[in-house]
Image (tube, helix red, strand yellow):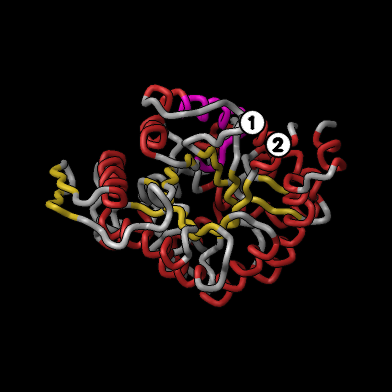
Amino acid sequence: MKRGLHKQIKFGYESAPYPWQTISDLAVYVEAQGFDSFWMPDHTVGFGIRRWDSLEAWTVLSGIAMQTKRIALGTCVSDTHRHHPAVLAQMAATCDIISKGRAILGIGIGEAMNLNPYGIKWDKPVSRTREAVKIIKRLWTEDAVDHSGRFYSLKHAFLQPRPVQKPHVPLFIAGNSPRTMRMAATYGDGWVPASMQPDEYREKLNYVLEEARKKGRFWDGMGGENPPEIEPALFIYLLIHEDYDTARDLILLPAKLYLLSRPRIIERLGYTPPTKEFDMTSDLVFNPAVSKKLLETAKKIPDEVVDKSPIIFGEPDTVIEKIEKYVQVGVRHFISPFFVRPRMMKKTCKLFAEKVITYFKDPSEKYIKTSNQ
């Protein structure tokens, strides 16, 4: 691995939907540990079995901005259905001003759990999101916006004050499908798909970059001196422990719960999902009965599915080895929730920072030598 390439890698921590004091304490802590970014899931309701707490993401990030100095602050991800694009643009710009230029707006096409129970319209989600993204970028950069589209209509609309970052707040677009990847290639400052194996990530990143080239966007190749216009990111769950077997024991059940909500991952691994009724990309809505059945069904997934899944876990050397494989196929920004209980979170983040972040960030020869073995 090239020395300069290691220094380009960023590590982001995504908080679970904890209470405010826990979230803010963790944000301050992970900044001190050397993480590059802190992310909030932008949900109306949390993904849970016994509790579904979820604080409003941009309010939380703006609060964190007052307690931190360096770490970037983003959503992974917001949707443009619960907030009109002008309102979402204003929310992100406000956080950027409060944080003195550290906001990142992550955008995805939305999930039923955050929309259906509240009667929020989200038909044609890709087309709607694409139009909203165009409006957001214009409001951040133009003096006045006139727009008459399929979903939105603006007349001499403008936002003041503008974001601190120029030309605007970075826009990271989530998506694993061809249409959402083309959206990222056209409008994104970053691309952040979820839970891919390294080979799949390489293939889809090449697709994004080729689509970006067609739009005249710049890319100088992996490991070049100049940063790309589109930052290749990856949302991926992670658990690290001093002992591999303990890490595996800790991650089995939460990983199965996650994989059950993503049955396509199970199918790509060559297994048959117990059911597809909990697919997060369809109409999954949480309530106590659904959560109880989700827990019971997840236990039916074989342990080896977790072993083969695109979830990173193990002791430090194994975690480093797995991350290296993603770096080699182009990932430059890892955004990771840690699959541990709150009481273990700081210890886990500290271990990750001391062993993994140091491995990728420390310029000393011992790390460069190890990475070439």
Label annotation for residue 223 = 1
* Relative to 151, 192 lies left or right: right
Q: Callout 1 environment at 10 Å: few (<14), some (14 to 19), or many (20+)?
A: some
Q: Residues within 10 Å of mark 2 (few under 14, many from 20)?
A: some
Picture quadrant where residue 172 is located: top left
User: Dividing the image into 4 quarters, which one contains the N terminus?
Assistant: top right
Q: Pointer 2: what residue? A: 4
Residue at image point 54% right, 26% down: 220
- Cα separation, mark 1 vs mark 2, equals 7 Å
**Residue type pointed to by label 1:** Gly
Label 1 SS: loop
Which region of the structure is painted magenta?
193-209
Q: Left or right: 84 with respect to 108?
A: left
Q: Which percent across, then down, holds residue 69?
A: 57, 66
Residue 83 screen position, x and y as percent: 29, 58
The answer to which of marks 1 and 2 sits earlier in the sequence is: 2
Query: CB under 8 Å between callouts 1 and 2?
Result: yes
| Residue at the (57%, 34%) spot, across then down | 226
Return the x and y of residue 21 as percentages of the image width and height: 55, 77
* Residue 302 sits in quarter: top right
Residue 272, can we see it? no
Mark 2 secondary-structure assignment: helix
- Per the picture, the main secondary structure of the magenta-coloured stretch is helix
